[in-house]
Image: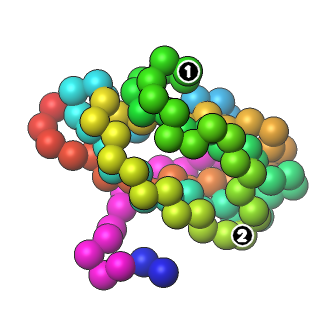
Amino acid sequence: MQWTTEAGVGLRVTSTQTGVVTLGTSTRPAILLGILVGSVLTAPTIQVWQGQVTGAGQTIIGAITCAANAFTRIPAYCSGGATVYVSACTLPDLTIYWNPVGSA
């Protein structure tokens, strides 16, 4: 369920963008809302860190497998931006919903 006050910027991740996706910056926080997985050949494994480098920030999600054709809510405020790592997926088709916060 999506609340009426919740709207996010959609960031599309496809086969040419596997690996690390950075949201926000170290000076511009990010609010993570969730990830929509489209029809994929294999379900992606998602890891999320607060911060700009995998493993260097605080872990928000260690490793989860997201189901195809489903939205996974990941409500999180990331003061130093966020990094999303996508792995174990053939032809990923993801939309990450998030919002930048504050000024650059």
* Image coordinates for residue 10, horizontal then vertical, percent: 44, 57
Lateral position of residue 34 relative to residue 42, left or right: left
Label pair 2/1, CB-CB below 8 angstroms? no
Q: In the current view of this chain or complex, which residue is farthest to the right?
A: 41
Looking at the rendering, in which quadrant would you find the C terminus? top left
Q: How many marks?
A: 2
Q: Which residue is mark 2?
A: 69
Camera-near label (2 vs 1) is 1
| Left or right of residue 93, residue 31 in this image | left
Please state the extent of the stretch shown in magenta in the rendering: 3-16
Q: Is residue 14 magenta?
A: yes
Earlier residue among tags 2 and 1: 1
Q: Is residue 88 above or below residue 2?
A: above
Residue at point 80%, 43% (across, down) = 89
Is 4 part of what is drawn in magenta?
yes
For label 2, the crowd category at 10 Å Cα-Cα, with few meaning under 14, some 14 to 19 and many 20 or more, is some
Q: Is residue 39 above or below residue 46?
A: below
What residue type is disc 2 on? Asn
Of residues 22 and 49, the one nearer the viewer is 49
User: Residue 94, located in which quarter of the rendered image?
Assistant: bottom right
From the viewer's perspective, is 76 left or right of 87? left
The x, y position of residue 12, in whole percent, is 54, 51
Q: CA distance from mark 2 to mark 1?
A: 28 Å
Q: Identify the residue at horizontal 26%, vertical 75% (top origin).
A: 5
- Asked if one can make out residue 36 in the rendered structure from this viewpoint, the answer is yes
Extreme-left residue of the structure: 103
Q: Label 1, secondary structure: give it.
A: loop
- Residue 7: percent from the left, percent from the top? 33, 68
Residue type at the position of mark 1: Gly
Mark sitting on residue 55 = 1
